[in-house]
Image (tube, rainbow, N blue to C red):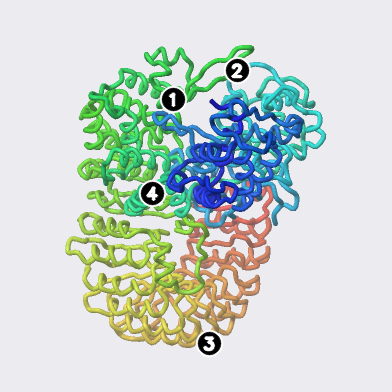
């Protein structure tokens, strides 16, 4: 038998070895195996190789005795560069030299009493506290209670991705859904990564260190584990050593049940390992103290709604909600630092208590961190390789594992499957499947047990979960368990036991090991209790992603899967009635009828639920009610896959829109991917685009749905490979698609070859939008081969911001010369410059050109471009609409353009010249156009320096009998009160003008009153007058209101 002191040394040594990483422990063994101190009595490598920390400590003590084992361990720590362990071990000073310096053998250790030195008894208070923290936080109990073993926190812990976030609680609630399955949202690529070490450091935005850091994350993101790791790393000397002398951990879950008044002194004393904490010494430097408040969202409403009066003295006793509120508000110990963890749902309440906190969000694991977690979980490298390879092939599940909680569930399932000798099944596709297999693995009989009997308590467990969910309750008392015929010991696998203080007694409370497990069991309760229970759940839910039933309903859908039903019936003897499926389908049908056969509100949530079912017939029946499907804010890879999986079964949909929300694979990797300035390379695209299965699902959708005529993808990282797969569907004979929009889908120029082939093969496709893709001139050349083909029936193409330079003008001109079907062309935002327009005009002048609408905004044109365009206008008799806004044409350019507009053969009806740097001189030319061109119906001159003089010149044309203009935009044109008289005169003479927009001008009350006087005249034909952006007095507003009563059809905007 070992003496008590010897056992203590053995325990301390094994504890130190527990802190070594796997690689460090292996290196430690190598050094020990070659240590000269052992002489001939070396430890056999065969015994050390597989030894864990405790076994290794026992081997060293057995071969060397406690003193020499301790000293050798310390020297080895220094050799493997773990100076923190060496320094801490030096302070321990546990081993006293024995007589004759002889090591104690195992047989003689009972007589070899090792005394603790006086220095150890007089240990520094900080060292005493750090020892306590290390003992408390080093080991964690794994959630899988059946295994019944502790796990070293440092060995299991994997750092999640943290980003600095500006406080916006409302958006934070909207952007997070599904109790944690959502990943980085629209602004994640803009957020700045931050490390734990710099949480309390100043940065470029705040020159002073933050006093409070709010660490937010959805359920299962690892907030509590991170908080505990902060405690452990501080105690081990790895974190905040120069910043904080003491760090205290406060669990909000435990505070919930505290009914006694206490002070900050009491709170700190409760964290100290022994009586007589030196609190007066600590409080002298409050700026060196850190309080970690873990789980703010778990506090009862009484904590959130506390009204004060707040504590002003750290020794003042108050109810716990007032004490905690005082600490957070900094009414006591204002120099104290706080680290608060919370779910986003509580941010709004928390924000009212804080002043200038730093907000940090846990985004979960990147792909690299997921891999690290898997290899940390599986100590066997072979198993880790097998599981990780499987997960990489099963991309949807691997994507879900960005949530640390899901990673743990998946690893637990796989580990037990491997230990039982089974192959990894392909059924791990959905959240429900993962939880189901995890549940069944926990309920399997232990080895050697001949029969398996379903515990009677399991029915009570699911009813407890459901009752808690209906009442939004997560902590249960003994009487709650008794109500459902449960005993804490029977369900310890799924419930945590919590001991809370109440007055002078302690009470025991229970909670599910994680909220998601309670939601899973509640879903099982609904599925097993038939239509009425399901109807109640669906009625309260309503497909709102922020509803407390969101994940429960998703699990409910997953349990409708036939395979899941069979697992339940075979393993637990529980049967889900087929009527439940029919009830769910009927409810979806009612939703469709109430929404006019349009699925938009809650669409992403419904598709996520249907994805859990994984049955074609069910999904097809569910979606058969919807003719229009619009899914917005699709942010993560998983959400994109879910949507594409489901939409291929939308056989009745006529219109399908999928709007992404800034998806980038960089959000799931270690570093965000910058947007390239030029055309992206194929290699860069491959790393940033969605998986091939996404394009394959969309391809199936367009070729199997005979009703689908419009497909719009916006900010879906389709990429060139995805386009290739989609085009396979577009070329299919069954594809009836007419309108295809692929805006900002990361499509490179090489993909245009596949699109060109689709344009040739598909004679139904008449509208194509590729805006926001960097196809460049090489890509356009490939696309134009299809556009020029006689089989192409495309009527409209939009190529906004596609990085097309001057040479693109020639390619498009060749299309206009050969394709008589093309009537609308949008080249906005491409730097064509004057040369590009010159080349384009060759096509506009060709007799075969039938173009009716041409958008050329922001194309870097100057006045030189206008001469060729004027010539084209005089020859092209089909062009009806032309937009030249945001080009630097100037007065000379506009006057050149007017020469073409005055030509008798010019049939242009709409001309937009907004922000073209034209002045009053141009107005004279436009007036002459209005006097001879009776085709022009709409004219936009907004944001130009027209002025009162320009309006007066323009009025000469507007009042001419030949003028047929109907709509005129003069927003922000520098018009003053004098313009009111001119406008009034124009309205008195012009009998065709029906809409006038003069917003953001300074007409003033005088000018507007003149207009009102004219508008009251029965002969005035104006029906729309917008006056927004003007400072008008009450009298003028009253006159406008009276005018609305006189002419109710008149739309007056002011």
Residue position marked by numbered label 1 in the rendering: 495
**Which dot marks residue 864?**
3
Nearer the camera: disc 1 or disc 4: 4
Q: CA distance from mark 3 to mark 4?
A: 67 Å
The image shows residue 958, relative to residue 1046, as above or below, that is: below
Residue position marked by numbered label 2 in the rendering: 501
Q: In the image, what residue occupies the spot 44% across and 77% down?
A: 804
**Which dot marks residue 1013?**
none
- The location of residue 428, given as percent across then percent down, is 31, 43
Q: Label 1 neighbourhood size at 10 Å, few (<14), some (14-19), many (20+)? A: many
Which quadrant of the figure has residue 519? top left
Q: CA distance from mark 4 to mark 2?
A: 42 Å
Q: CA distance from mark 1 to mark 4?
A: 28 Å
Which numbered disc, 3 or 1, marks the residue that appears first in the sequence?
Answer: 1
Question: Element at badge 3?
Answer: helix
The reply, left or right, for residue 368 in relation to residue 19 is left
Question: Element at badge 4?
Answer: helix
Using the image as rendered, state which of residue 1000 and residue 366 is in the foreground. Answer: 366
- The location of residue 768, given as percent across then percent down, is 33, 67
Using the image as rendered, state which of residue 193 and residue 266 is in the foreground. Answer: 266
Nearer the camera: disc 2 or disc 3: 2
Q: In the image, what residue occupies the spot 63% across and 46% down?
A: 1038
Question: Element at badge 1?
Answer: strand
Residue 160 in view here: no
Which numbered disc, 2 or 1, marks the residue that appears first in the sequence?
Answer: 1
The reply, left or right, for residue 775 in relation to residue 105 is left
The image shows residue 543, relative to residue 724, as above or below, that is: above
């Amino acid at each position: 038998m070992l003496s008590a002191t010897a056992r203590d040394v053995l325990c301390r040594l094994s504890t130190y070895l527990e802190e070594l990483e796997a690689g460090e422990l292996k290196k430690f063994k190598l050094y020990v195996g070659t240590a000269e101190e052992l002489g001939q009595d070396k430890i056999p490598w065969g015994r050390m190789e597989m030894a864990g920390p405790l076994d290794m400590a026992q081997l060293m003590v057995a071969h060397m005795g406690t003193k020499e084992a301790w000293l050798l361990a310390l020297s080895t720590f220094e050799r493997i560069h773990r100076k923190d362990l060496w320094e801490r071990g030096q302070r321990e000073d546990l081993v006293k030299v024995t007589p004759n310096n002889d090591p104690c053998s195992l047989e003689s250790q009972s007589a070899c009493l090792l005394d603790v030195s006086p220095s150890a008894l007089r240990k520094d208070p900080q060292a005493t506290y750090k020892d306590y923290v290390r003992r408390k936080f080093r080991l964690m109990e794994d959630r899988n209670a059946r295994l019944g073993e502790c796990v070293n926190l440092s060995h299991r812990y994997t750092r999640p991705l943290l980003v600095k976030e500006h406080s916006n609680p409302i958006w934070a609630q909207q952007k997070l859904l599904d109790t944690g399955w959502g990943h980085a949202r629209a602004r994640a690529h803009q957020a700045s990564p931050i490390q734990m070490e710099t949480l309390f450091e100043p940065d470029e935005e705040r020159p002073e260190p933050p006093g409070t850091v709010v660490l937010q994350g959805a359920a299962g993101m690892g907030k509590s584990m991170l908080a505990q790791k902060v405690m452990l790393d501080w105690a081990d000397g790895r974190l905040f050593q120069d910043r904080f002398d003491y760090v205290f951990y406060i669990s909000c879950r435990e505070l919930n049940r505290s009914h006694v008044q206490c002070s900050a002194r009491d709170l700190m004393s409760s964290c100290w390992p022994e009586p007589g904490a030196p609190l007066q010494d600590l409080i002298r430097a409050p700026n060196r103290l850190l309080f970690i408040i873990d789980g703010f969202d778990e506090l009862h409403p009484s904590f959130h709604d506390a009204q004060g009066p707040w504590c002003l003295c750290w020794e003042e006793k108050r109810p716990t909600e007032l004490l905690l509120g005082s600490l957070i508000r900094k009414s006591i110990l204002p120099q104290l630092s706080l680290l608060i963890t919370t779910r986003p749902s509580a941010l709004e309440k928390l924000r009212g208590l804080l002043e200038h906190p730093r907000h940090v969000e846990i985004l979960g694991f990147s792909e690299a961190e997921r891999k690290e977690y898997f290899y940390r979980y599986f100590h066997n490298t072979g198993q880790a390789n097998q599981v990780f390879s499987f997960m990489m092939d099963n991309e949807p599940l691997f994507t879900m594992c960005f949530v640390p909680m899901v990673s743990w569930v998946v690893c637990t399932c796989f580990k037990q499957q491997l230990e039982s000798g089974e192959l990894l099944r392909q059924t791990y596709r959905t959240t429900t499947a993962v939880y189901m297999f995890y549940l069944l693995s926990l309920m399997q009989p232990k080895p050697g047990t001949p029969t398996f009997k379903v515990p009677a308590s399991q029915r009570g467990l699911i009813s407890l979960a459901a009752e808690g969910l209906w009442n939004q309750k997560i902590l249960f008392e003994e009487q709650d368990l008794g109500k459902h015929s449960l005993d804490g010991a029977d369900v310890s696998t799924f419930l945590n036991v919590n001991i809370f203080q109440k007055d002078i007694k302690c009470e025991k409370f229970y909670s599910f090991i994680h909220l998601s497990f309670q939601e899973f069991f509640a879903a099982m309760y609904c599925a097993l209790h038939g239509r009425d229970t399901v109807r109640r759940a669906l009625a309260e839910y309503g497909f709102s992603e922020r509803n407390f039933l969101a994940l429960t309903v998703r699990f409910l859908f997953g349990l409708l899967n036939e395979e899941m039903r069979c697992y339940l019936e075979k393993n637990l003897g529980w049967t889900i009635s087929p009527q439940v499926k029919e009830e769910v389908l009927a409810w979806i049908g009612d939703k469709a009828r109430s929404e006019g056969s349009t699925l938009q509100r809650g669409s992403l949530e419904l598709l996520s639920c249907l994805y859990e079912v994984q049955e074609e017939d069910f999904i097809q029946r569910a979606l058969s009610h919807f003719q229009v499907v619009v899914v917005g804010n699709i942010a993560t890879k998983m959400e994109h896959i879910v949507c594409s999986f489901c939409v291929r079964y939308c056989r009745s949909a006529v219109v399908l829109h999928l709007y992404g929300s800034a998806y980038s694979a960089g959000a799931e990797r270690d570093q965000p991917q910058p947007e390239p300035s030029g055309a992206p390379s194929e290699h860069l695209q491959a790393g940033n685009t969605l998986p091939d299965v996404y394009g394959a699902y969309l391809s199936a959708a367009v070729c199997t749905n005979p009703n689908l005529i419009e497909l719009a993808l916006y900010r879906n990282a389709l990429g060139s490979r995805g386009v290739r797969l989609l085009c396979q569907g577009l070329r299919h004979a069954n594809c009836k698609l007419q309108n295809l929009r692929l805006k900002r889908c990361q499509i490179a120029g090489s993909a245009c070859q596949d699109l060109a082939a689709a344009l040739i093969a598909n004679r139904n496709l008449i509208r194509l939008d590729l805006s926001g893709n960097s196809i460049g001139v090489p890509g356009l050349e490939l696309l134009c081969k299809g556009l020029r083909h006689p089989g192409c029936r495309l009527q409209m193409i939009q190529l906004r911001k596609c990085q097309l330079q001057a040479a693109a003008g020639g390619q498009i001109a060749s299309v206009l010369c050969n394709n008589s079907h093309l009537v609308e062309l949008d080249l906005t935002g491409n730097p064509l410059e004057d040369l590009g327009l010159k080349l384009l005009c060759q096509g506009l002048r060709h007799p075969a050109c039938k173009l009716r609408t041409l958008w050329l905004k922001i194309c870097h044109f100057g006045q030189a471009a206008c001469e060729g365009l004027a010539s084209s206008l005089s020859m092209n008799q089909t062009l009806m609409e032309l937009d030249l806004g945001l080009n630097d044409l100037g007065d000379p350019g506009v006057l050149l353009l007017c020469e073409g507009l005055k030509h008798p053969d010019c049939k242009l009806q709409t001309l937009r010249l907004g922000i073209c740097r034209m002045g009053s001189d141009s107005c004279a030319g436009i007036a002459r156009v209005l006097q001879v061109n009776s085709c022009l119906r709409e004219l936009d001159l907004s944001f130009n320096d027209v002025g009162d003089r320009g309006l007066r010149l323009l009025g000469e044309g507007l009042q001419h009998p030949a003028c047929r203009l109907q709509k005129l935009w003069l927003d922000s044109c520098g018009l003053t009160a004098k313009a009111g008289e001119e406008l009034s005169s124009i309205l008195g003479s012009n009998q065709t003008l029906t809409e006038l927009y003069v917003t953001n001008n300074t007409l003033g009350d005088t000018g507007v009153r003149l207009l009102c006087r004219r508008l009251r005249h029965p002969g005035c034909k104006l029906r729309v007058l917008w006056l927004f952006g003007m400072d008008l007095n009450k009298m003028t507003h009253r006159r406008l209101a009276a005018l609305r009563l006189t002419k109710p059809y008149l739309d007056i905007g002011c």
